[in-house]
Amino acid sequence: MDVSQLREICLGFPGAFEDFPFGPETSVFKVRAAVAGGARHEAKMFALSSMDPENWSVSLKCEPALAEQLRAAHPEITGAWHMNKTHWNGVRLDGALPDGMVRDMVEDSYDLVVATLSRKQQEQLGWARLARPQGS
């Protein structure tokens, strides 16, 4: 996976955009839904990447139990630097992990962040929660 592939994956989600609050060398991918009247809600980050080819990585949100499992199974995945390591993984993008696995982790991160938005914002993004079984 290269920089353009990661950028394409991240920007392919509804409401996703790229921001550079830490300077041009660090891409921050966020999601935000529009509201009536053209106003916007606060954006929420789902991926952060140092786009440095020499030390390329991405920080992604992850469910805590899965984060531990991924870190135990893959030395390329660690607690994300400068982030809450319970909820964020740092993923080294040196080619050791399959592109599909990285794509799935990015999608999971996006879903975890969108799940924290209001139902109206989720609907505006075209995002649907998994259906709950009857009687739950």
Image (tube, rainbow, N blue to C red):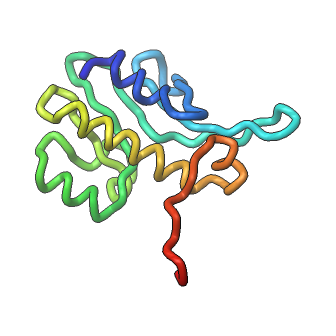
Q: Return the residue found at the far front.
A: 134
* Residue drawn at the location 39% of the way across and 47% of the way down: 108
Q: Return the residue found at the far right.
A: 37
**Image quarter for residue 8?**
top left
Q: Is residue 131 above or below residue 58?
A: below
Horizontally, is 108 left or right of 73 in the view? Answer: right
* Residue drawn at the location 41% of the way across and 46% of the way down: 109
Percent position (x, y) of residue 33?
68, 39
Horizontally, is 69 left or right of 85 in the view? Answer: left
Percent position (x, y) of residue 135?
54, 83
Count of numbered badges drawn on the protein: 0
Q: Considering the image in quadrants, where does the N terminus appear?
A: top left
Percent position (x, y) of residue 54?
20, 18
Q: In this view, does 26 lie above or below 120?
A: above
Q: In this view, does 119 lie above or below 82?
A: below
* Residue drawn at the location 51% of the way across and 49% of the way down: 113
Q: Which of the two residues, 4 or 133, is positioned nearer the viewer here?
A: 133
Percent position (x, y) of residue 31?
57, 37
Horizontally, is 114 left or right of 35 in the view? Answer: left
